[in-house]
Image (cartoon, rainbow, N blue to C red):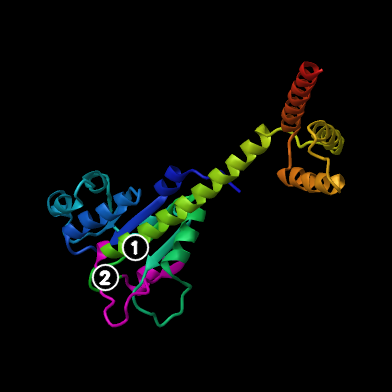
Amino acid sequence: MSEFNLKSVLKNVRVVLVGTSHAGNIGSAARAMKTMGLSDLRLVEPCEYSAVQGDACALASGATDIVASAHNVADLSSAIDECTLVIGSSARSRTMPWPMLDPQEAAKLIVETAKQYPVAMVFGRERTGLTNEELAHCQYHACIDANPEYSSLNLAMAVQVFAYQIRCTALECDRKVDNIVNSIEKAVSADKPATAGELNFLFQRLESVLAKAEFLFQQDPQYMLRKLKRVVYKAQLEHKEVNIIQGIFTSIENKIKSLSKKID
């Protein structure tokens, strides 16, 4: 398993917009990307690219840096050239069957691949989406399972859905790595478990101290000791913890001796 780095994974995720009709949609898509930590935007033949710095930036709402750094390329091949995984967003079924993913499945595949390599999520035109030829550039197609009675999603909404799933998946991977690291650190820093010999000596001291404190003057003192042993075993004491308890016993015994001398 390769080392996981949230920022580098998200940096490896590329959003490709093909044939965008309205510059404002580019700005809205950039905003959707930035809220989820994505920054690599590629524009394939946007119809209003000349207006990008105007309408696009107006709707980017704080994500103008994404718009400003977007690469404008001539064709889809150029936009995805160095990507090892390409997934195309498709809202309609095609005559030729293609591996289909939902957003969650797509996000898992994207994040896993983006740990090491650039990946691309491709979105088509607002009205017609991606052509069959463009979808043929994608290893997988992904579809948002929207309400069949009203499945109309604008471009920025679609980008937001996938970007959100990608971020959630990446954050979950990041948490798992943190948990593994924390577990390793705890294991390294933890004291060694108490040995059976240390516990047996602890039990002997326990019995002695309880006897001196007159706690075991009852019908079945061994039953009480067995119950106390169970409590100790459940605690899974470490070597240092046993030493601390032994110190407590010593202090109690010294106090009992001191009180006995005063009484005498």
Identify the image quadrant of residue 81: bottom left
**Label 1 secondary element:** helix
The reply, left or right, for residue 242 in relation to residue 87 is right
Rounded to the nearest whole Å, what is the CA distance between mark 1 and mark 2?
Answer: 10 Å
In the image, which disc is placed on residue 86?
none
Proximity of marks 1 and 2: CB atoms separated by less than 8 Å: yes
Residue placed most toward the observer, 30 or 222: 222
| Whether residue 183 is situated above or below residue 146 in the rendered picture | above
Task: Compare marks 1 and 2 and give the one earlier in the sequence.
Answer: 2
- Residue holding disc 1: 161
In the rendered structure, does residue 139 fall within the stretch colored magenta?
yes
Quadrant location, the C terminus: top right
Identify the image quadrant of residue 195: top right
Residue placed most toward the observer, 258 or 248: 258
In the image, which disc is placed on residue 153?
2
Count residues near mark 1 (Cα–Cα under 10 Å), then give few for <14, some for 14-19, many for 20+: some
Q: Residue at x 74, y 23 (%)?
A: 251
Principal secondary structure, stretch drawn in magenta = loop
Q: Residue at x 62, y 36 (%)?
A: 185
Magenta span covers which residues? 130-156
Q: Position of residue 21 (x, y in %)?
A: 19, 64
Q: Position of residue 42 (x, y in %)?
A: 31, 53
Q: Position of residue 47 (x, y in %)?
A: 18, 61
Q: Amino acid at mark 2?
A: Leu
* One can see residue 217 in this view: yes
